[in-house]
Amino acid sequence: MTKFRLIAPLMVLMLVLAACGAGNGGADGSPDAGATDGGTDATDGGGDGGGTGAEDDGSITITSLWGGTEQEAFEAVLAAFTESTGIEATYEANRTDYATVLRTRIQGGNPPDVAIIPGIGTLRSLAREGALISLSELGIDQGSIEGNYAPGILDVGVVDGELYGLMVKLNSKATIWYSPERFDEMGVEPAEDWDGLLQLTEDIKAADATPWSLGAADGWTLTDWFEIMYLKMHGTEAYDTLFSPEGDWTDATVQETIDKMLEILNEDNVDGGVDGASATAFVDAIAKVFSTSPSAELYYGGGFVGGIATGTDVNPELQGQEGTAIDWFPFPTIDGNGEGLVTYGGDVMAALVNDSDVKAFMEYLTTAEAGQVWAEGGTIISPIVDVDTSVYPTTLIQAEADQVTSAEAVRFDGSDLLPGVDLGALLQAAFRGEDTGPLLEEFQAAVTTAWSEE
Amino acid sequence: MAVATRAEVSAPPAERNPGGGFNFVALAFMAPAALLLLTFLVFPAVYTLALSFNRGRGGQFSEWVGLTNFINLFTNDPNFLRLGFPPAGALWNNVLWLVFYVFLSVAVGLLIAVMATRVRYEAIIKAIVFLPMAIAATAIGVIWSFVYFPNANTGLLNGFLGVFDVGPAAFLGSTDTVNWAIIAVGVWGSVGFCTVILSAALKGISTEVLEAARVDGASERAIFFRIIIPMISLPIAVVSVTLVVNVIKLFDLPYVMTRGGPGASSRTIAFSMYQEAFPQGRFGYGAAIAIVMLLLLIPVLIYNVGRFRSDRVTA
C-alpha cells in the first residue's frame, strides 16, 4: 500500500503543471491564434508555408459540400479559372459533416485556401474568430466589384462592415414544383393566390391523389416554407427585423404565419401524413413527386429541386421533358400580398489563406466569365448581373433567373442569417401539432442569447 | 546493474517504514506511464474544464464567462434539459436510456442465458445472440434505419406491420417513438454481451446447490430468484456498470440514425457535446457539456474502483 503514497503527490504535481499550461494558453490567446498569425506572416514574408500547401505556389484548394451535378458545374468553373490564370485549383468535397471538418481543419492550422461557408451565422463566427481573410485584406476593392452584382446581394457576406463572403450562386426559394402532364390529367391548374392553392389542394384530393410531398426530416425545408410565407404576408421590413437581433419571435405575425402554413401542411394533405413526412428527407420527398412511381403532386422547394429531380438521385429520364413532365409555378400571393417578393438561398465563399493565388481566384469569381461558366452547368443562378440568361441550359432555370432578376424585392434565406439556433426544429414541432406558444417563447430566449453571444 | 539491484533490494525496508524516505526507483518506473496519463488524460481534462468557463469561440480561449455556460445549459437550453411533464432533452433521454436500455439488456440477456443452458443447441443460440456484437455500432445504426424506414417497400418492420394492416409508421420520424426505437436497437446490440457474460457466470454455480434446492422442494421460480440471481449478482453488477458507462457516452446510434432528430428529440449528452462544439463552433458550451458528462461518470468510476479493491472481485 505504501507504494500508492507516491502517486498522490505526483498526481498533484501533474494537475498543477497541467493547470499552469492551460492558464498560459488562455492568457496569450491560444495555440490556434499562433497558427493564424503564421499564415498571415507567410504571405507578408512570402513562402514559409502554412495552409494546405506552400503559399503563392500556383495552386489552391477549395472545399465545399457539393457533390453530383453541383460539383460538376463548379469543377467547370475551376477548369476555366485554371485555363485563364494557370493556377491549379483542386476541389475537395465533404458531403457530410462539412461544418465539423472545416472547423477542425481551421483549428488544426490546415485550412483550405478557399471554402464555401455553411451558413451566414458560421460566416460571422469564423470571421470574428479571425479564421477568414476579408476581401480588402486580399487587396480586392469592394467598390470595384459592387457593380457586378444585383443590389443587396453582396451585403449578405459582410461582417462588421468588412466583406468576407462572396455570394457565388443562388437559387430562388419561391418555386412550387409539379408535373404539367399529370395536372392536365387531373384537370387542375397552378394557383395564383393562397386560396387558389388551398383549392388546388382540395381538387387534387378529389382526383384521388395526394397533393403535397414534404421532407420534414430536414428542418430547413420547413424554414423555407415559413420564410417565403412570412415575407409575402408581412413584407420586407417585418422580415428584415425578424431575422435581425431585434427580431421578436413571440410577435403575433410569427404565429399567424405558422397557422397559415399548417393550413396546407397537415395530416390530410401531406403524403405519409405528419409522421411519414417527419421521417422523409428532402431528396426522398422530391422523389415522391418526380420518381417513376410518384405518390404526390406538389413539392415546394428552391430552384435546385429541378436539378435534383432530373438528376441520377431521382429520375434522369425527366431530362429534356422540362415544361411537360416537370415545371414550377411561383409561390402564390397570400391574401393579395407579396406579389413580386422572392426569397432566395445561396452560398458564400470565403478565403482562409492570404496569398496571390487566392486573390486571383476570388477576383475571378466576381467576373461575368465565371458566372457564365457556372450558369451553363444548369444547377444555379449566378448572382452576377452580366450573365446572360440565355446561357442557362433549361427553360426551368431561365425562368427561375428571370423570377429573381425581375423581382420587386429579394430576401436572403432568413434562417441562414440566424446565429446557432434551430428554427427548423421549432417548425417541425409545430408541424407535429405541438403548442407553439411556449415553444416560441423558448425560441425567443434562445435566439436572444445566441445573438448576444455572437 | 549492481547498483540498481542494490537499490531494489534496499526498497522493501523503505516500504516498511511509511513516511520515511522517497522512492526514486518507483518514480522512475512510473514516469513513462505517468507522462502518458498526464499528456492524454489529465491535460485534456483540465483544458476542457478551463474551456467550459470560457466562451471558447472556435476552440480558442476568447472570453471568461464564469458559470454562464453551465447556467444556460440547465436553465435556458430545452435541447439539453426541458423540465415539465414529460421532461425532455438530451439529459432526460440519457435517463431513459439508463433505465430501459440497461434493465432490458440485462433482463433479456439473463433470460436467454438461463433458457439456453437448458437446451442442447445452446452454442448455436448464443452464437446468434452474440452476432450483433461483431457488427460496428455505425453499421447497426444503418441496418436498423432501413428496418424502421417508413416506406413499407423498404422498411422491414413496416412491411411486416403492413401484413396486419397496421401503419406504416415513421418510428424515427416521431418524437413519441424515436427514443424507444433507438433504445430497442441498443438493446439488440448489447443483449449478446450480457448473455455471454451471464451464461459463463451461470456455469459457475455448482450443480449441487441447485440439486439440493430441488430436493428440498423449491420451485424453479424460487430457485431462479432466491439462488441463481443472488449467486450471480456480481457479474450482473459488472455487466450493468459496463452498460451504464455505454449509456453516458452514447453517441453513435443517434448520430447515425437520426442526427439527434427529429428536431433535437433524440439527442444524448455526448451528441449534444458534439453538436454544440463542432458544427456550431461553441466550444466553451460543448466543453461544459463534457464536464457534466465527466461528473456523471465519476460515481460510476468510484464504484468500479471500490469493487476492484474489494476481495469480492475474485469471488
Image (cartoon, rainbow, N blue to C red):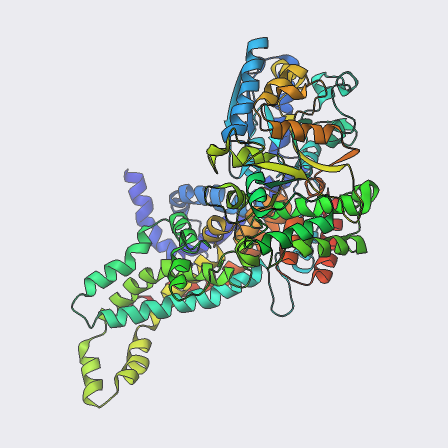
**Left or right of residue A167, residue A54 in this image:** left
The picture places residue B88, in percent across and down from the top left corner, at 60, 63
Residue placed at 23% from the left, 74% from the top? Answer: B205
Q: Where is residue A153 in the image (x, y as percent from the top left)?
A: 74, 28
Tell which of A160 and B211 is nearer to you. A160
Res. A263 visible in picture: yes
Q: In which quarter of the image is the N terminus of chain A?
A: bottom left
Q: Which residue lies furthest to the left in this view?
A: B120
Viewer-side residue, A121 vs A153: A153
Specify the quadrant of the image occupied by residue A381.
top right
* Left or right of B283 in this view: B257: left
> Along the line of sight, which residue is nearer the eye, A291 or A132?
A291
Residue B250 sits above or below residue B313 on the image: above
| Residue A106 location (% of width, % of height) | 58, 31
Residue A171: give x, y in percent of width and height.
65, 33
Q: B101 above or below B68? A: below
The answer to whether residue B213 is above or below residue B291 is: below
